[in-house]
């Protein structure tokens, strides 16, 4: 099942150089299963052709309210009645001003005004020069649009086509696609705060060498994303991994187990749910050399001595808030065999209500996985699926098990 299967999206383009990203966005939406109807303003057609957008969406593009292809000659009505959402990307400063004022002198602003507002949400992805974005007139329009019920998405930060640097770039195509997927997702965790640990830790031997493990962080990142999609405020404490931060998630990067422990300690008081997916190194070199350890030519190997790392999950699970039920703790177990027995034993040992088992070698670095959920009631299998899909199922399972957790409405 794709993330936007069955969804009908009107993709509007107003005039801006970010139109080039709309082509990629259209492709991404179609790939996720959406049916995309493109509507372009005249200005947009200066930046990208309708031919490109037609080829990518597989649908004729509309550009004029006088288009005679609709039998009743009312494209502004017909194109929105079956739509699940209108997404205008790019939304120029002029276009925002127009919609904020309820003007309707061309097809795209006309259909924004004529849409059944209760049923067809309007999402706007602003794209403009940083001065235009910061201008009080634009900010007034954005505030008005939000007050009128439109979803005005964030802008990106960075180099702009004009050569300046600052706020106002349109979000990237994959970010907009994620925003839309997240927009449609149910929000059972709304008002709740979730803290996730993810990835491996790295324990230094000297400044250039260290001990780590093969955890890719993908499962933890997928869980952070799913929790965010479900409406939670999410903090993700990540060991050294090369993964993009899920949209809307607050990320804290750490290196060692002790860094992770400190980051968790700093954030745990604000969490209602703690999900420990990180593959924390159990031991660290007792001493980390200040300088690179050199071969001395004698053939002798260095002797490494280890110290045990703090057990972050067990510590959190023993806290007052966890024991009183105000904080719900979920542990993970990466095992190589006897999953059920190990997961049961680990749940007891860590003192957590829910332990999620998986077979480490079969999942490290992969995009899919299978999970075994063990709680006081017994074991539930989540069969092999993509990590994103499993993450959503796990979040739903956590939601079902936490009716009394603080913050839940
Ligand atoms: N964990 C943790 N801190 C540690 C070790 C583990 O927070 N120092 C958490 C992991 O994030 C995971 C759970 O504890 O949620 C289980 O981790 P795992 O490494 O499988 O368990 P261990 O306690 O290390 O047991 P063993 O290595 O003997 O299987």
Image (spheres, helix red, strand yellow):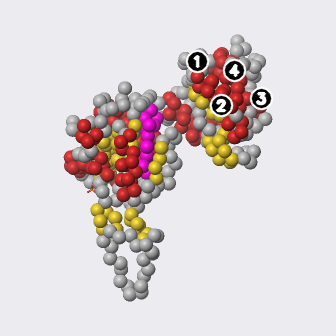
Toward which corner of the image does residue 274 lie, by quadrant?
top left
Q: Does the magenta segment cover residue 234? A: yes
Residue topped by disc 3: 42
Of pointers 1 and 2, the one earlier in the residue sequence? 1
Residue topped by disc 4: 101
Which segment is the magenta one?
Answer: 226-238
Residue 139's tag is 2
Q: Which label sits in the foreground, 1 or 2?
A: 2
Toward which corner of the image does residue 408 lie, by quadrant?
top left
Give left or right: position of 348 versus 283.
Answer: left
Mark 3 is surrounded, within 10 Å at the Cα level, by few (under 14), some (14 to 19) or many (20 or more) other residues, namely some
Q: Secondary structure at mark 4?
A: helix
Q: Quadrant of the C terminus?
A: top left
Residue 93's tag is none
- Across and down, in percent, residue 154 comes to 59, 36
Q: Residue drawn at (29%, 54%), measured in percent from left and top? A: 311
Marks 1 and 2 sit apart, C-alpha to C-alpha, by: 22 Å
Residue topped by disc 1: 117
């Amino acid at each position: 099942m794709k993330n936007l299967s069955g969804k009908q999206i009107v993709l509007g383009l107003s005039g801006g150089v970010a139109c080039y990203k709309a082509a990629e966005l259209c492709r991404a939406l179609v790939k996720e299963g959406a049916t995309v109807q493109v509507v372009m303003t005249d200005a947009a057609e200066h930046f990208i052709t309708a031919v490109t957008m037609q080829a990518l969406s597989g649908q004729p593009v509309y550009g004029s309210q006088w288009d005679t292809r609709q039998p009743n000659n009312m494209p502004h009505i017909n194109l929105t009645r079956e739509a699940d959402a209108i997404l205008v990307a790019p939304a120029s400063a002029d276009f925002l001003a127009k919609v904020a004022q309820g003007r309707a002198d061309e097809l795209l602003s006309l259909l924004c005004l004529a849409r059944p507002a209760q049923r067809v949400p309007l999402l706007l992805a602003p794209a403009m020069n940083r001065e235009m974005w910061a201008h009080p007139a634009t900010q007034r329009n954005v505030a008005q649009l939000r007050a009128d019920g439109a979803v005005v998405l964030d802008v990106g930060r960075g180099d702009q086509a004009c050569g300046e640097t600052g706020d106002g770039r349109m979000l990237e195509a994959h970010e907009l696609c994620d925003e839309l997927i997240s927009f449609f997702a149910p929000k059972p965790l709304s008002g709740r705060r979730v803290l996730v640990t993810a990835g491996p830790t790295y324990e230094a031997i000297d400044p250039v060498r260290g001990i780590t493990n093969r955890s890719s962080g993908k499962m933890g990142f997928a869980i952070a994303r799913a929790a965010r999609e479900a409406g939670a405020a999410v903090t993700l404490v990540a060991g050294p991994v090369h993964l993009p931060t899920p949209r809307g998630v607050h990320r804290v990067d750490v290196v060692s187990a002790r860094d992770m422990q400190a980051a968790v300690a700093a954030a745990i008081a604000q969490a209602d749910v703690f999900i420990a997916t990180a593959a924390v190194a159990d031991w660290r070199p007792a001493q980390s050399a200040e300088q690179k350890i050199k071969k001395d030519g004698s053939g002798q190997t260095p002797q490494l001595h280890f110290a045990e790392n703090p057990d972050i999950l067990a510590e959190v699970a023993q806290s007052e808030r966890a024991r009183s039920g105000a904080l719900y703790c979920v542990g993970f177990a990466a095992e190589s065999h006897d999953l059920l027995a190990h997961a049961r034993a680990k749940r007891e040992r860590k003192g957590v209500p829910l332990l999620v088992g998986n077979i480490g070698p079969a999942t490290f670095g992969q995009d899919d996985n299978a999970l075994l959920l063990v709680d006081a009631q017994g074991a539930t299998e989540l069969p092999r699926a993509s990590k994103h899909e499993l993450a959503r199922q796990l979040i739903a399972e956590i939601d079902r098990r936490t009716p009394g957790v603080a913050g839940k409405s």
